[in-house]
Amino acid sequence: QVQVEESGGGSVQPGGSLRLSCAASGFSSRRNCMGWFRQAPGKEREVVARISMISGTTSYARYYADSVKGRFTISGDNAKNTVYLQMNSLKPEDTAMYYCAIMAQVCSGQTEVSQWTRGGASWGRGTQVTVSS
């Protein structure tokens, strides 16, 4: 059974930084697409960033939503099956529940949430990020 667990959320002032972590376990695929998503109250879930991870090699094929380009960085540790989201210059509009998901394939698109849900992604329960003064 695939398990996905996010951590690292919290409250921060505008302009601050947070680093989210997502650890995945219980899967056998060596080629995976892992992504970060967020959902604010009253809004649909959106893709924030995603990355391909192949066991024993480097991570690649990074994608970022326009709203976070230049501020957020996604990275992966293949040995730990863990993906990170470094969030800098946070804005109040970044406030949301942040989710992580994993799909047993390298990323090929996966820039829409529907591609993850149709593709059988496994999801974590989320971690709250609040940006407020």
Image: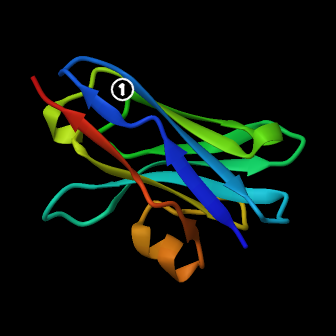
Q: Secondary structure at mark 1?
A: loop
Q: Is residue 76 above or below residue 12?
A: below
Query: In the rendering, at what x and y percent does residue 75 appear?
Result: 61, 34
What residue lies at 73% left-to-right and 48% top-to-bottom? 53
Residue 43: image location, x then y, percent: 18, 63
Judge whether 116 appears above or below 6 on screen.
below
Looking at the image, the residue that sits furthest to the left is 133
Along the viewing direction, whichever of 62 and 99 lies nearer the viewer: 99
* Residue 79 position (above or below residue 108): above
Question: In the rendered view, does 17 fall on the left or right side of 21?
Answer: left
Q: Which residue is mark 1?
A: 71
Give coordinates of residue 116: x percent, y percent. Answer: 52, 71
Which residue appears at 32% of the width and 33% of the height?
Answer: 10
In x, y percent, where is residue 93? 16, 40
Among all residues in the image, which is located at the extreme bottom? Answer: 118
Q: Amino acid at mark 1?
A: Arg
Q: Nearer the viewer, residue 118 or 70?
A: 118
Q: Is residue 50 above or below residue 26?
A: above
Specify few, some or many for label 1: CA neighbours under 10 Å numbering under 14, 14-19, or 20 or more: few
How many marks the image carries: the answer is: 1
Q: Quadrant of the C terminus?
A: top left
List the single residue furthest toward the top. Answer: 15
The residue at 67%/42% (across/down) is: 82
Residue at 45% of width from left, 35% of height from top? 8
What is the basis of the colouring in this image? rainbow
Q: Point out the image quarter for the N terminus.
A: bottom right
